[in-house]
Image (cartoon, rainbow, N blue to C red):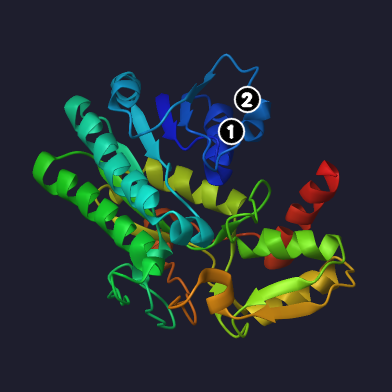
C-alpha cells in the first residue's frame, strides 16, 4: 500500500514508519520538525520505498496532494508534551484541531481510510481503576490550559467519528496511554526519558508534585504492534480503542526503580506543580487503561515489562553519548 504518516519523524511516527516499510509498504512521512527529528528516520533515508516531506498539516496545499496519492493515512502529527501545551496553547490547539480537520476533509475527498491517534488525556481527571473507552470525561475549567490538549483530542475524535457516521469515511481511533521507548525526548515533560537521563548522569531526579500519582507505561514496540493489528482489521472500523499497558506504578516508585536498574547515585528531589507549570496547574492522580476491547478485537496484549523499557531507553542514551 501507499501510506502517508503525518508526524512521521516523531517518536511513535518514526517507529511506525520503519515497521510499515519492513512490512513491504511504500511510505511517505510529513513532519514540520517542531518536535520530530530527522535523525529518527536515519534507517529509512536510503530506502526507495520511503519519502520524507518537510511540511505542515496546516498547509492544505502540501497535505492534500499527499493524501490523494495515498491508500491509507496514519494521522500522528500533533502538538505533544505538557510543557509544550501549557507554554504554547494557541499553536497547540490549532495544530491539533485544524490539522486533524484538514486531514479528514482531504481524506474524505478521495475516500482514503484514516487511522487517528488520540490520547488517554481525553479522560481528564477520571481516576477509575480501569478506564474503558466508553467512560466519562472529567475535566477542569476551560481556562486551565492543562486541559486544552484533552479538549483538542476529544474534538479530533468527534470529528473523525462524525466523518465515519455522516460521510461513511473509514476511520479508526486509538487512545495511547503513556508510550515510552527509544527516541522519546524528555524535553517536553516526558517522565521516563527525563528520569533515565538524570539517573545515567547521577544528577538529581526531579519529581513534580508529591510523586504519589500513578501511571501505566507501554513500550513503543508493543504499541506499534497494536497499531498495525488494528489498522488493517475489518472489525475495528469506526471504533475508539485504548492502547496501553495496565501495569500501574507511582512516580515515586518509578524514580526508585530507574535509580536501581541504572545503578545510579541520583537523589530524588521534589518541585511543586506551581513552580514547574505555573499557578493553577492540575494533574491526574492516576490513569489506568482497560485493554479488554483491543484484546477481544485483535488479540493484542503488551509483551514488554517496565524493566525492558528502562533498559532500552538507557541503552540508546548511552549509545548516543
User: Earlier along the polypeptide chain: callout 2 or callout 1?
Assistant: 1
Confirm whether residue 215 shows in the render: yes
Q: Residue at x 73, y 75 (%)?
A: 255
Tell me, yes or no, whether the two marked residues, 2 and 1, touch with CB atoms within 8 Å: yes
Q: Quadrant of the C terminus?
A: top right
Q: Which residue is mark 1?
A: 18
In the displayed structure image, the side of residue 118 where residue 104 appears, left or right:
left
Q: Residue at x 78, y 63 (%)?
A: 198
Residue 184, x across and y down, in percent: 63, 50
Asked which secondary structure carries label 2, the reply is helix
Confirm whether residue 117 shows in the render: no
Rounded to the nearest whole Å, what is the CA distance between mark 2 and mark 1?
7 Å
Residue 298, x across and y down, in percent: 42, 53
- Identify the image quadrant of residue 266: bottom right
Residue 239, x across and y down, in percent: 27, 54
Q: Which residue is mark 2?
A: 44
Q: Residue at x 27, y 47 (%)?
A: 237
Disc assigned to residue 84: none
Asked which secondary structure carries label 1, the reply is helix
In the displayed structure image, the side of residue 263 where residue 182 appears, left or right:
left
Amino acid at each position: 500500500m501507499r501510506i502517508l504518516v503525518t508526524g512521521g519523524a516523531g517518536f511513535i511516527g518514526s517507529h511506525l514508519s520503519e515497521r510499515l516499510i519492513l512490512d513491504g509498504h511504500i511510505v511517505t512521512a510529513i513532519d514540520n520538525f517542531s518536535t520530530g527529528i530527522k535523525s529518527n528516520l536515519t534507517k529509512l533515508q536510503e530506502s526507495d520505498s520511503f519519502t520524507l516531506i518537510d511540511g505542515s498539516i496546516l498547509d492544505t496545499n502540501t497535505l492534500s496532494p499527499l493524501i490523494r496519492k495515498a491508500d491509507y493515512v496514519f494521522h500522528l502529527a500533533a502538538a505533544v508534551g505538557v510543557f509544550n501545551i501549557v507554554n504554547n496553547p494557541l499553536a497547540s490547539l490549532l495544530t491539533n484541531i485544524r490539522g486533524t480537520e484538514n486531514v479528514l476533509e482531504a481524506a474524505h475527498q478521495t475516500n482514503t481510510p484514516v487511522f487517528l491517534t488520540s490520547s488517554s488525556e481525553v479522560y481528564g481527571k477520571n481516576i477509575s481503576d480501569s478506564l474503558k473507552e466508553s467512560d466519562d470525561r472529567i475535566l477542569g475549567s476551560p481556562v486551565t490550559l492543562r486541559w486544552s490538549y484533552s479538549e483538542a483530542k476529544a474534538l479530533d475524535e468527534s470529528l473523525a467519528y462524525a466523518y465515519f457516521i455522516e460521510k461513511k469515511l473509514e476511520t479508526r481511533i486509538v487512545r495511547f496511554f503513556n508510550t515510552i521507548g527509544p527516541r522519546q525526548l524528555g524535553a517536553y515533560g516526558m517522565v521516563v526519558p527525563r528520569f533515565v537521563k538524570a539517573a545515567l548522569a547521577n544528577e538529581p531526579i526531579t519529581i513534580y508534585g508529591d510523586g504519589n500519582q500513578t501511571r501505566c507505561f507501554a513500550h513503543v514496540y508493543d504499541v506499534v504492534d497494536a497499531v498495525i493489528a488494528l489498522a488493517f482489521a475489518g472489525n475495528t472500523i469506526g471504533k475508539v480503542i485504548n492502547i496501553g499497558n495496565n501495569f500501574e506504578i507511582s512516580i515515586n516508585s518509578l524514580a526508585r526503580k530507574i535509580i536501581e536498574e541504572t545503578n545510579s547515585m541520583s537523589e530524588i528531589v521534589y518541585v511543586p506543580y506551581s513552580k514547574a507549570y505555573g499557578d493553577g496547574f492540575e494533574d491526574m492522580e492516576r490513569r489506568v487503561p482497560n485493554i479488554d476491547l483491543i484484546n477481544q478485537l485483535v488479540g493484542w496484549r503488551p509483551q514488554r515489562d517496565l524493566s525492558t523499557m528502562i533498559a532500552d531507553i538507557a541503552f540508546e542514551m548511552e549509545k548516543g553519548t
